[in-house]
């Protein structure tokens, strides 16, 4: 018991006043011995006992009145356990609405059974309990804005909203959801928190392979402002054999292709169920137009395969390529997949040449343009022209050229560049552009090191030394070693059975000064280990520095078939970071770069129909729009406004987590490990509270009850006093003195 005004307890000694009055009110008599009196006393003994009880009752009533007055002023607070009542509960329901809960089961789906379990918990709540619902997929999201009282109309509305929820294509992170529930503000003071996770029991999403991470839950629960009980509820009958054939994803060799150029689309298909699947077909389409049908072979559980389709597209634009399985299984949402393919007429690049060569046949730009399928002046395209559309300029025009209009810049043996031009190139690469520097006779080693290695924040990963070799002596040369098959820029070049990279002869080359311990990516090496081409990432872009020219002055590379492959593959590799990445895995940042003249704001529509306002950040002379909350799989549409205030949408596709199709449930060993690490309990009554964690209701004030008791006590005291006075008058007859007695 506690008191709000304990100072009034100093009045407790006032209890002695009724006691003192009781003792001092007794009359002090002088005894006179009278023989006949003993008969009268014998008859008065019972009456004297009654009078003592009467006086004691009055004494107790008056003491109780004084105590009630002092107690009411001190305002005592009594805990609920004294009165046999438990405290209010802060109930948080975490409902797993991930894609796996859409599994068909007995005429319905698993999610419907989860809703039944959640409804059982809601119906048990009392008016003093508070309820919240947290959806677990694809990221923790509160279904309501604030806690609602159990049994109220608000609780019924919340339950109705929960019944309207459907599984989405995302995956649930149960650990993050429980952490969000533990970090939530308590619904009141002196409450006990009950966190109930209603899930289908799928192992994915629990991080069961690393149960140690759940120790953070136990630590967080101990530090929480209120004690928490965490229980996991898995509906009965959800385990058993599963038939599921899933299209995990679609990939393409290039996300951007040219008009009329064939592109190979590959679908990854896997049997994620527990039963073998029969052979079936996979239909490809785009914009309701059929592209073809592929055959998927019969697969055993856990076995996957890839199915490809090669298709040219004659119309430019952004195409939504879809593939769908013909067969039906227990998990329909993963029977199809989408891929956004950008079909374009050209990708602009800028080719910068140095001083004109006296012999046009030795011009570096001539060979480079021929490899792309263009004439020597880049004005005419041949039938075999690539998607890359080059613009040829002299290095002196580089100062005034707007670089943001190009996906890649190629410096073909240019002389010394001014410092401001070098810095301009640095900004271009940082913003996502690609830069290819081909060195040659016009390269000034000292100027290169100063402009591209020292002062330009490392456009070149290594400094240069003076070149070696004699370009006029064709009898002395070094060959190239086959490059790595693992690097995307050299994977095709490494195939010496179909290409002739091993026939390259280098007569003269620049040397890279590699200090001991320096880490650099080497694309091409000469025999003996000397670097011929190196690369590095800078900001969002990439840079390749090549120690030989693009022409035949120092090597025979332009005369080989490998040269055409190298030019096109390296241009793809360099332009890739600057291209808009439209196909994203879940939770990857969505990003678009626009000219600085564009409007500084944009709106984004998510797969759920929600709108988000984005604001561009100026970086290296461009506006960059980013959105990080891409957990929901599906199509995102970003609407931008240009200088003329005309809106143009940009589409993006966020893919599903392939593991969400794996319906393998948690094993008993995993459940035991998770329970031990996180302090959770699988099964049992979701609202049962252990005695060691029991919290009672807040202390209750007794002042009102004491005031009511005071009134009753005073009424009783008055009634008793009135009754005693009346009894005294009735017991004592009146005496009248009459004349007639004579002496």
Image (cartoon, rainbow, N blue to C red):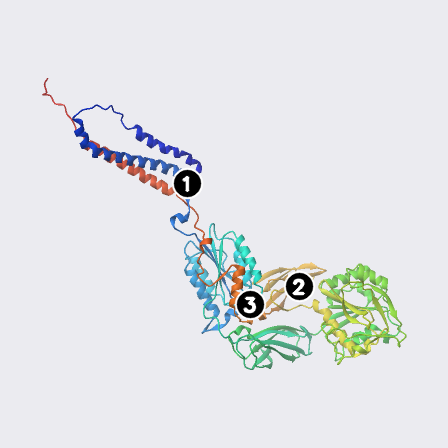
Where disc 2 sits, the SS reads loop
Residue hosting label 1: 75
Task: Look at the numbered discs 1 and 2 and tell me whether their residues touch, using CB distance below 8 Å.
Answer: no
Quarter holding the N terminus?
top left
Viewer-nearest of labels 3 and 1?
Answer: 3
Residue at x 32%, y 30% (from the top left corner): 21
Residue closer to the observer: 589 or 278: 278
Mark closer to the chain start, 1 or 2: 1
Residue closer to the observer: 123 or 579: 123
Mark closer to the chain start, 2 or 3: 3
Residue 478 coordinates in the image, percent (x, y): 84, 74
Mark 1 and mark 2: span between their CA atoms?
70 Å
Q: Mark on residue 642? A: 2
Residue hosting label 3: 204
Residue closer to the observer: 25 or 248: 25
Rendering quarter of residue 514:
bottom right
- In this view, 643 is above or below 265: above
The residue sitting at the top extreme is: 743
Quarter holding the C terminus?
top left
Where disc 1 sits, the SS reads loop
Mark 2 and mark 3: span between their CA atoms?
43 Å
Mark closer to the chain start, 3 or 1: 1
Rendering quarter of residue 472:
bottom right
Rendering quarter of residue 655:
bottom right
Mark 3 and mark 1: span between their CA atoms?
56 Å
Task: Look at the numbered discs 3 and 1 and tell me whether their residues touch, using CB distance below 8 Å.
Answer: no
Residue 182 coordinates in the image, percent (x, y): 52, 56
């Amino acid at each position: 018991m506690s008191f709000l005004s304990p100072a009034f307890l100093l009045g407790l000694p006032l209890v002695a006043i009724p006691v003192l009055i009781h003792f001092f009110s007794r009359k002090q008599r002088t005894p006179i011995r009278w023989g006949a009196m003993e008969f009268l006393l014998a008859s008065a003994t019972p009456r004297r006992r009654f009078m003592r009880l009467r006086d004691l009752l009055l004494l107790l009533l008056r003491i109780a009145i004084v105590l009630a007055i002092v107690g009411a002023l001190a305002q005592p607070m009594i805990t609920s356990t004294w009165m046999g009542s438990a405290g209010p509960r802060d109930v948080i329901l975490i409902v797993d609405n991930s894609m796996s809960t859409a599994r068909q089961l007995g005429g319905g789906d698993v999610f419907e059974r989860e809703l039944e379990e959640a409804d059982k918990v809601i119906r048990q709540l009392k008016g003093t309990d508070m309820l919240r619902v947290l959806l677990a997929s694809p990221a923790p999201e509160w279904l309501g804005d604030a806690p609602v009282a159990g049994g109220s109309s608000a609780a019924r509305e919340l339950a109705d909203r929960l019944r309207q929820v459907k599984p989405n294509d995302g995956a649930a992170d149960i650990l993050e959801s429980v952490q969000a529930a533990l970090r939530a503000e308590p619904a009141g003071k002196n409450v006990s928190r009950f966190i109930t996770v209603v899930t289908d029991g799928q192992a994915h999403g629990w991080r069961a392979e690393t149960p140690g991470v759940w120790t953070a839950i136990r630590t967080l629960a101990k530090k929480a402002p209120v004690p928490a009980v965490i229980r996991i509820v898995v509906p009965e009958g959800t385990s058993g054999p599963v038939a599921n054939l899933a299209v995990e994803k679609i990939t393409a060799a290039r996300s951007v292709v040219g008009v009329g150029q064939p592109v190979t689309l590959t679908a990854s298909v896997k049997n994620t169920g527990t039963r073998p699947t029969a052979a079936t077909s996979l239909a490809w389409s785009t914009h309701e137009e059929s592209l073809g049908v592929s055959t998927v072979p019969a697969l055993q559980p856990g076995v996957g395969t890839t199915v490809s389709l090669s298709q040219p597209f004659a119309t430019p634009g952004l195409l939504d390529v879809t593939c769908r399985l013909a067969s039906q299984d227990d998990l329909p949402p993963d029977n199809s997949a989408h891929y956004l393919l950008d079909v374009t007429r050209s990708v602009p690049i800028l080719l910068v040449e140095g001083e004109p060569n006296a012999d046009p046949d030795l011009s570096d730009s001539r060979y480079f343009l021929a490899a792309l399928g263009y004439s020597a002046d880049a004005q005419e395209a041949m039938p075999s022209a690539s998607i890359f559309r080059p613009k040829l300029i002299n290095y002196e025009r580089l100062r005034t050229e707007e670089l943001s209009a190009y996906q890649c810049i190629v410096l073909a043996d240019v002389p010394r560049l001014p410092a401001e031009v070098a810095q301009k190139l640095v900004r271009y690469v940082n913003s996502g552009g690609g830069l290819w520097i081909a060195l040659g006779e016009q390269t000034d080693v000292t100027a290169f090191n100063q402009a591209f290695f020292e002062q330009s924040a490392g456009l070149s990963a290594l400094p240069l030394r003076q070149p070696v070799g004699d370009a006029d002596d064709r009898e002395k040369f070094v060959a190239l070693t086959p490059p790595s098959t693992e690097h995307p820029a050299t994977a095709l070049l490494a195939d010496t059975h179909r290409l002739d990279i091993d026939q390259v002869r280098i007569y003269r080359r620049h040397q890279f000064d590699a200090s001991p311990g320096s880490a650099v990516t080497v694309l091409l090496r000469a025999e003996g280990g000397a670097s011929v081409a190196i690369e590095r990432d800078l900001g969002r872009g990439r840079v390749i520095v090549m120690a030989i020219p693009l022409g035949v002055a120092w090597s025979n590379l332009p005369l080989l078939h490998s040269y055409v492959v190298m030019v096109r593959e390296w241009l793809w590799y360099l332009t890739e970071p600057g291209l808009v990445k439209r196909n994203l895995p879940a939770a990857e940042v969505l990003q678009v770069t626009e000219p600085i003249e564009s409007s500084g704001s944009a709106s984004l529509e998510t797969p759920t129909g929600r709108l988000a306002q984005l604001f561009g950040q100026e970086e290296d002379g461009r506006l960059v729009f980013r959105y990080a909350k891409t957990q929901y799989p599906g199509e995102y549409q970003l609407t931008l406004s240009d200088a003329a205030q005309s809106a143009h949408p940009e589409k993006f596709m966020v893919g599903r987590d392939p593991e969400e199709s794996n319906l393998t449930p948690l094993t008993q060993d995993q459940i035991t490990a998770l329970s031990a690490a996180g302090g959770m309990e699988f099964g049992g009554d979701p609202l049962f509270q252990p005695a060691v964690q029991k919290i009672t209701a807040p202390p209750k004030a007794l002042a009102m009850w004491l005031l009511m008791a005071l009134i009753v006590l005073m009424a009783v005291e008055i009634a008793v006093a009135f009754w005693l006075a009346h009894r005294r008058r009735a017991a004592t007859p009146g005496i009248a003195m009459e004349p007639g007695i004579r002496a």
